[in-house]
Image (cartoon, grey):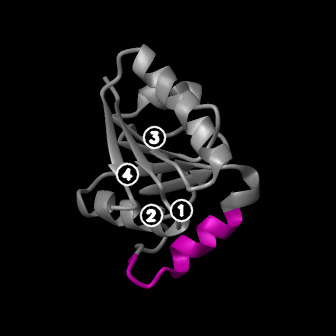
Amino acid sequence: MTLIEFHFNVADKFGKIAQLVQQHLDRGQRLTILCPTSVVQSLQQHLQTQAPLMLPSGALNHPDAPIYLHHQLQQISHDDVLINLHHPQPNQFSCFLKTIEIVGTEEQDKAQARERYKFYRERGYEISNIDAAL
């Protein structure tokens, strides 16, 4: 069953994503990052220029790469980790071993995250909560 991890009170979502990407790449895992169309290009640029994040050449943004960043889930060639910035949760989240939800500090973001949390909990998924403010 997919493990669900909520990172909440995240003031810098791009920074948190870069940190999570590095952690999972260091473990040899591959990631899919699902985000709104309006965010794809700026997040991609952030990940490519983030100083502590060392991405191998060709590591980003094609289905066979270690990191696949897109606004919708398409044919993904791995099932390791999904980082979700969409609301509601994607239908295919359960195809991954782990789904990570990033929740900012804005009230609308928190309210939408509560809905996704309830959805996962009602279906019996194991949920870990990580408070970024601590």
- Mark sitting earlier along the chain (4/3): 4
Horizontal side of residue 107 vs 131, given as left or right: right
Looking at the rendered structure, the kind of residue marked 2 is: Lys
Q: Is residue 35 magenta?
A: no
| Mark pair 2, 4: CA separation | 17 Å
- Give the magenta part as a residue range: 41-54
Horizontal side of residue 86 vs 13, given as left or right: right
| Mark pair 3, 2: CA separation | 24 Å
Eye-nearest disc, 3 or 1? 1
Horizontal side of residue 30 vs 39, given as left or right: left
Tags 2 and 1 touching, CB below 8 Å: yes
Q: Quadrant location of the N terminus?
A: top left
Q: Is residue 43 magenta?
A: yes
Tags 4 and 3 touching, CB below 8 Å: no
Instruction: Determine the main secondary structure of the stretch shown in magenta.
Output: helix
Horizontal side of residue 126 vs 122, given as left or right: left
Residue 73 seen in the current view: no
Q: Quadrant location of the C terminus?
A: bottom left
In the rendered image, which residue does mark 1 sit on? Answer: 13
Is residue 111 shown above or below 104?
above
Looking at the rendered structure, the kind of residue marked 4 is: Arg
Identify the disc placed on residue 30. 4
Quarter where residue 45 is shown = bottom right
